[in-house]
């Protein structure tokens, strides 16, 4: 359960925030304006999430690894083990 919460914490926080904004804005604005606000928030959350994600490039050969190490761009190394 904790791994699921950690993995989807951004999505959960975004949903909770959107619910609070929806409840608050329906008391101030009409439902059409509320829907517009929620759509704008959804687009903003999605754009932010996509901009902060990294590409999932996999290196399969030693020559690909050497090419990446010779480049001037930063490299994120993620190690995975089932043990």
Image (cartoon, helix red, strand yellow):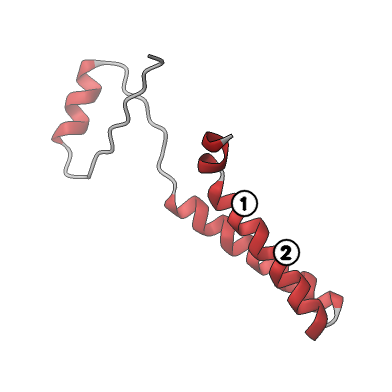
Question: Which residue was labeled with disc 1?
Answer: 12
What secondary structure is marked by label 1?
A: helix
Left or right, 39 with respect to 55, comes to right
Question: Which residue was labeled with disc 2?
Answer: 19
Q: Vertically, is 68 above or below 44? A: above
Left or right, 17 with respect to 36, comes to left
The foreground one among 26 and 72 is 26
Instruction: Name which residue lies at 25% across and 23% down.
Output: 64
Q: Which image quadrant is residue 83 in?
A: top left
Instruction: Name which residue lies at 22% across and 32% down.
Output: 68
3D distance between C-alphas at marks 1 and 2? 11 Å
Left or right, 60 with respect to 15, comes to left
**Horizontal and vertical percent position of residue 1:** 59, 34
Q: Vertically, is 77 above or below 21? A: above
Numbered badge on residue 61: none
Q: Which image quadrant is residue 72 in?
A: top left
């Amino acid at each position: 359960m904790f791994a699921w919460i950690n993995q989807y914490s951004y999505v959960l926080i975004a949903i909770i925030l959107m619910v609070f904004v929806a409840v608050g804005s329906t008391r101030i604005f009409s439902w059409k304006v509320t829907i517009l606000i929620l759509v704008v928030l959804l687009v903003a959350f999605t754009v932010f999430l996509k901009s902060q994600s990294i590409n999932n490039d996999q290196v399969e050969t030693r020559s690909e690894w050497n090419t990446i190490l010779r480049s001037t761009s930063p490299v994120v190394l993620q190690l995975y083990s089932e043990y």
